[in-house]
Amino acid sequence: MANIIDGKVISKQIKDELKEQVACLNRDGKEVCLAVIQVGNDPASTVYVGNKKKACEYIGIKSLAYELPEKTTEAELIELIEKLNKDDNVHGILVQLPVPKHINEETIINAISPSKDVDGFHPSSVGALSIGKKGFVSCTPAGIIQLLKRSGIEISGKECVVVGRSNIVGKPMAMLLLRENGTVTVCHSKTKDLKEVCKRADILVVAIGRPKMIDASYVKEGATVIDVGIHRNENGKLCGDVDYESVEPVAGAITPVPGGVGPMTIAMLMNNCVEAVL
Ligand code: GUN
């Protein structure tokens, strides 16, 4: 029987700590402000953006919502970002991804000032992480480190295996585990003997984007298993990249889907917004 790592409880703890910090800042006459830009009306993005606004409200962060039409040009979007970059009353800027196809995502990420890059996607933030300098860290992997630390799971000296090498999760996850003195292996679609590599892990982070791909045969007895995936099956039920029913009896600790990694992403975004003011 694995310990269930409860992302809802841990993210609430973090949000409550941030709420107190923001109240303190407010008493000193400082307000925290996040600008959230959505281009078009992708339904999933609308839900994510709504959740970000709600979290801001809960913590006491002011949120400015920019809901731009699908046909917005890249130049218009950059103009708005540059205006927000210059606005001293705005501390964080977030452009919800994906942007419509006629807009280049990389150009947009690069346009955000690294000092307001609360998503941690700017090359300057990514570079800072890789050389151990201060900078904003991508929210999902930063949230996973909090899940581990707040559950009392030691990272130092442990075999950490990350399955997936995306810029948003896999790569920054590897850098963060390394920063915590883990021994880190990154696996991907071309990895030979994926099962054997995963079976070495004391801490296995799965962000591969394939429903229930990792079953008990990939997991060492007692390992901590972190599931970043989220998928909806034909019956509308959510599942992760990990086959929870199969892995749970073998793992020492495991994150459920939903209610594991998911809630941590927004909590860490809020954390980055507060850090932007400090
Ligand atoms: N789209 C899906 N996840 C994210 C995220 O963490 N940040 C942004 N900006 N867009 C996203």
Image (cartoon, rainbow, N blue to C red):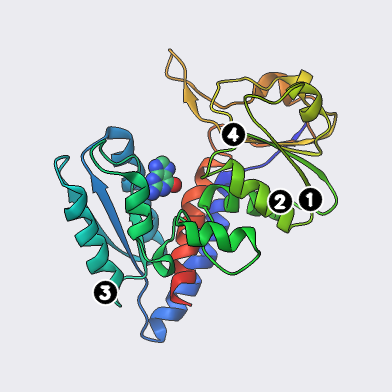
Q: Residues within 10 Å of mark 4 (few under 14, many from 20)?
A: many
Beta carbon at label 1 within 8 Å of ligand 1: no
Task: Identify the residue under disc 1.
Answer: 182
Image coordinates of residue 243 in percent, x first then y, are: 65, 21
Q: In the rendered structure, which amino acid carries the disc numbered 3?
A: Asp
Of helix, strand and loop, which one carries label 3? Answer: loop
Q: Earlier in the sequence, mark 3 or mark 2?
A: 3
Residue drawn at the location 48% of the way across and 63% of the way down = 272
Task: Identify the residue under disc 3.
Answer: 87
Dividing the picture into quarters, in which one does residue 13 lie?
bottom right
Q: Earlier in the sequence, mark 4 or mark 2?
A: 2
Q: Earlier in the sequence, mark 1 or mark 4?
A: 1
In contact (CB < 8 Å): disc 4 and disc 3: no
Task: Identify the residue under disc 2.
Answer: 177
28 displayed left or right of 15: left
Residue drawn at the location 21% of the way across and 49% of the way down = 74
The residue closer to the viewer here, 198 or 33, is 198
Q: CA distance from mark 4 to mark 3?
A: 36 Å
Q: Residues within 10 Å of mark 1 (few under 14, many from 20)?
A: many
Q: Earlier in the sequence, mark 1 or mark 3?
A: 3
Q: CA distance from mark 1 to mark 4?
A: 18 Å
In contact (CB < 8 Å): disc 1 and disc 3: no
Q: CA distance from mark 3 to mark 2?
A: 35 Å
2 displayed left or right of 81: right
Task: Identify the residue under disc 4.
Answer: 207
Q: Earlier in the sequence, mark 2 or mark 1?
A: 2
Q: In the rendered structure, which amino acid carries the disc numbered 4?
A: Ala
